[in-house]
Image (cartoon, helix red, strand yellow):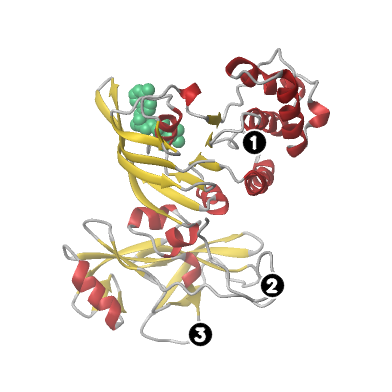
Amino acid sequence: MAETTLDGVTKRFAGDDGEVLAVDDLSLTVRDGEFLVLVGPSGCGKSTTLRTIAGLEAVSAGAVHIGDRDVTDVKPKDRDIAMVFQSYALYPQKTVRGNMRFGLEMTTDLPDAEITERVADAAELLDITELLDRRPAALSGGQQQRVALGRAIVRDPAVFLMDEPLSNLDAKLRAEMRTELQALHDQLGATTVYVTHDQTEAMTMGDRIAVLDGGRLQQVGTPMETYYEPTNEFVATFVGSPSMNIVEGTFDGEAIQLPGFEFPLADDQREAVEAGLTGETVRLGVRPEDIVLTDETGPRTVEFETLVVEPMGNENVLHLDHEMGEVVATVGGNQRVRKGDRVRATLGADRVHAFDGTTGEALFNRTRDEQRPPGVVGARGTDDRAETDGGETG
Ligand code: ATP
C-alpha cells in the first residue's frame, strides 16, 4: 500500500497533424488505501494518466511518486504496481493457474511454495478455485475478468491500476462486479486508481473521483462533493444521470433573467454572482429531481408542456418544453403524466446552481442537505448513533 502522487504531470504526443496535449499539468494525490476513480469523456487523458503512473508512458514534464519513491524514471516492472486492463490479456494456452503464476515466476524470486499459496489465496478470494485448471477459452467474460484481477492480486502490489476493467461485461454482470470490486477493495485495502468513462461507476465505486476534461483536472472530491458542489459546468453536467439542466440567462442585479422566466435570487446567491461573474451571461443549472411538480404558483414556478414521458418503473423521466428551452425532470414512477399535458413545476430556491456564462466556473451551488434517514439504527461497526464521516477515507 502506498500514497501515489502526480506532480505537474504533462504528456504530449506527436500526432499526425501536430502535437497532442493528452495530459496537461496534472497534480493529484491518491491517498494510501484509497479507491480513486479517474473519470471523463473519451479522449480526456484518463488512460494516458494511468499509463504514466504505470510507467508505460514516459512523462513530458512532471513527476510521479509511489510511496516515498520518485518513480518518474523507474521501469514499469520496478514500480510495484499491477495493472488490470479492459482486454483481460490472458495467455490462451495457459490454465487459470498458469496465468496467475506466470507474472510472479517471471518477475520475482519467490519460492514455488509461496507462489502456490498466493495463487490459492487469490483464487479463494475471487471464488475461482474450481476454475484453476481451465483455460481462458472455457471461461465466461466475468470469469476471465476475475482471473485478470487474480493475476494482479497475487503480485501484492503497492498500487492497483485498473483501466476500464468492466467495460466488456454485460450490464447486469458489470453491476455485480462493481459491488464485488468494492468488497475486494474493502478486504485488501490497497491503493487503487480506476479509469472509467462511466459516471455511474465513478459515483458508486470511488472514495473520491477525479474528473478530467481535455487533459486537465476539473475537480477531485467525494462523489457527493462533485454532485452537489461541482466547481464548474463541465463537472455539473458530467456527473449525474439524467444530466443537470442548463439554461442561459443574464443577471440584472436582482434576478437571473431567462427567456420567459425570471429566477429571483436570495441575498447570498446575488452576492455570489456579483462577486464572481466575469461577463453578462449566467447559466442556471437545475437537476432533474429538483424540478418539482406543484399545484401552487409562486415566484419560481414555471409552466411547461410535456413533450415525452419515459417510464423507468421507479421514476418517470419527463422532457418538458418552455420558452427557455427543453428541460428534463424526474418524478415518481406512480405519478402519471402524459405526453401533451401542461404541468406546473417549481425550481427550488436553494436547489439551483449558477455558472459563469464565459468561464463555466460555478458562481454558487445548491445547498447540500444530506440527512440521516429513518431506519439507520447504528453507525458502521458500532451500535450507537454516532455520526460517521460522509465520504472521506483515511
Ligand atoms: P478513452 O476513454 O477513449 O480511452 P482517454 O480519456 O483514456 O480516452 P487517452 O487514451 O488518454 O484518453 O488519450 C488522450 C489523448 O491523447 C487523445 O486525444 C488521444 O488521441 C491522444 N493519444 C493517446 N495515446 C496516443 C499516442 N500513442 N499517440 C498519439 N496520441 C495519443
Q: Secondary structure at mark 3?
A: loop
| Distance between the alpha carbons at the discs numbered 1 and 3 | 45 Å
Circle 3 packing at 10 Å, graded few (<14), some (14-19), many (20+), is: few
**Image location of residue 141, percent across then percent down:** 69, 30
Asked whether the residues under the numbered discs 2 and 3 touch, taking CB atoms below 8 Å apart as contact, a structural biologist would say: no
Q: Where is 126 relative to 56, above or below?
A: below
State the residue at coordinates (46%, 29%): 54
Residue type at tag 2:
Gly
Looking at the rendered structure, the secondary structure element under dot 2 is: loop
Please state, as top left, top right, bottom left or bottom right, where the N terminus lies in the image. top right
Instruction: Kindly identify the residue that appears in the image at 51 percent across and 45 percent down.
Output: 198
- Specify whether 131 is left or right of 224: right
Quick check: can you spot residue 90? no
Amino acid of disc 1: Leu
x, y percent for residue 149: 64, 33
User: Would you say the residues marked 1 and 3 are in contact, meaning their CB atoms lie under 8 Å apart?
Assistant: no
- x and y percentages locating residue 243 in the rendered image: 45, 57
> Foreground residue, 68 or 373?
68
Q: Which mark is residue 169?
A: 1
Where residue 244 sits, quadrant-wise, is bottom left
The residue at 65%/64% (across/down) is: 314
Which-is-in-front pick, marks 1 and 3?
1
- Name the residue beneath numbered marker 3: 295
* Residue name at image x 43 percent, y 65 percent: 228
The mark that comes first in sequence, 1 or 3, is 1
Mark 1 vs mark 2: in front: 2
Residue 348 found in image quarter: bottom left
